[in-house]
Amino acid sequence: MSAEGGDGLANPKPSPYEEAMSALSSLITTRTRAEKSNSGDRFELLFDYIKILELEEPISKLKVIHVAGTKGKEKATNDIPMPTYFRFLALLAFKIFSAEQVDVAIMEVGLGGKFDATNVVQAPIVCGISSLGFDHMEILGNTLGLIAGEKAGIFKVISLSSNNFEVLLQQGIPAFTVPQPEEAMSVLEENASKLNVNLQVASPLDPNLLNGLQLGLHGEHQFVNAGLAVSLCSTWLQRTGHVEVPYLLNTSSLPQQFIKGLTTASLQGRAQIVPDQYISTEGHGDLVFYMDGAHSPESMDVCGRWFSNVIKEDEKQVSYVEHPLSDNSSISFEMAHSFHNSASRKSSTQILLFNCMSVRDPQLLLPRLVKACTSHGVQFKQAFFVPNISVYNKVATNVPQTATRADLSWQLTLQRVWESLVNADKGGSAKDSDLSPDEAQDEKEKGIISGTNSKVFPTLPLAIKWLRDNARQNQSVRVQVLVTGSLHLIGDVLRLIRK
């Protein structure tokens, strides 16, 4: 039955899907992540949830690869509070993995390690810790040592008992990491030693092992991640009886299945290149989005190097491979051929489209990005700062038809940091705005706040429209837009440009 609204008209009854999204949204806390006031933060509650859901035995039977790295009002049984959003999703994952009897469950921590929801797994097959950096410092600590200590919380030891349940031996679960800064590595090694865990350092993957193919995930840092993946998978196969000797002992070749996985892997929002189909299909203008969800100082370095290298490579050989899209479509050969022919005759300009969460420090993020780019000869003509469309306290799958205008105080802060940074690089000399009086008035009416080297847009759709209009008006210029700082922003841009 439909409920009657205040205007006397019947409100449509929400669908089961909408009701599910609303229920999930109710589990998202409105407090900041660093607060400890919510009782759902008590890690021991997870074991109560697992007992209620009768998941103790099913979880113990899962063959888990556990990975860490930097990169409510309702009540449940016995007055136990409802789990918060991420913990609910982790419990749901355990429920589904157990019901489906998966061969392997690869669980990555959401934040930290020691008190993460995924750390209820007591006996994983193997553990891995990827590159560590300064992220989530308001929770994990402000030094690499403290952060590494939290990540090392996923290291495990199991007790081997005799028939009469007498503990005979404490055996550590094998663990791998990648080359780390000394401060982080020493803490990882110390924690591993306390638990008798054999912690090994996985070497970056040798590109020659790919038989002439390229990694599916782009960026030089992905060879580090690939080396860790090979070590983890190889150890899992050996410890579960699928192979007698781990592949990682053979440094001259990889199984074909490994090569296929490494070369076909894809991850949206990480080193992803998406030509704007709206502009391309019109046949007027040239607009390409380079997207990477980097949001820590270290990942800004990586993002800047990737962006610089890939646009320079485009200049040398303007060619496009087909990039798979979220709707299973791809860029047509004709579109790629047209792009090749047009781009080869064009100059290029680089624009930064940026936002980050207010818990992050833009004075740590933006300088690292600029330094990485300028060291490769790449300078942004403009930086655009925008609010996200998606919100942190509501689960939704669609971009609203009309983006509401948000408080821009944070974006103005980002703009001030950028202007100060760019002017310092120019020796303190700020040039006058390139806008004509008419253009300046038009932007003012639209709520666009222009600085010397940047703009703040009241909505993301308005920024996308500005970029498209600019590409149409300057058809001799190839506009290359780096979108970074927030995975929320990446998701919003992808949804908008693929509509």
Image (tube, rainbow, N blue to C red):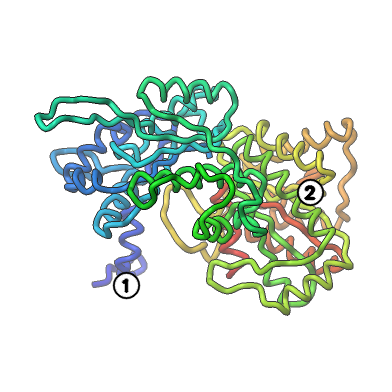
Residue at horizontal 34%, vertical 72%? Answer: 9
- Quadrant for the N terminus in the image: bottom left
* Quadrant in which residue 443 is drawn: bottom right
Please indicate, yes or no, whether residue 324 appears anywhere in the rendered image: yes
Q: Nearer the viewer, residue 477 or 428?
A: 477
Q: Tell me the quarter of the image containing the C terminus.
A: bottom right
Secondary element at tag 2: strand
**Mark 1 falls on what kind of element?**
strand
- According to the picture, the residue beneath numbered tag 1 turns out to be 10
Identify residue for label 2: 382
Distance of label 2 from label 1 (alpha carbons): 48 Å
Within-10-Å neighbours for mark 2: few <14, some 14–19, many 20+? some
Query: How dense is the environment of label 1, judged by Cα within 10 Å: few (below 14), some, or many (20 and up)?
Result: few
Tell me which amino acid carries mark 1. Ala
Q: Is residue 287 left or right of residue 68?
A: right
Q: Nearer the viewer, residue 459 or 106?
A: 106
Q: Earlier in the sequence, mark 2 or mark 1?
A: 1
Of residues 124 and 82, the one nearer the viewer is 124
Instruction: Residue 274: give x, y in percent of width and height.
Output: 66, 63
Q: Position of residue 275 (x, y in %)?
A: 70, 65
Q: Residue at x 81, y 40 (%)?
A: 374
Side of 374 relative to 103 (left or right): right
| Residue 491 picture location, percent across and down | 55, 56
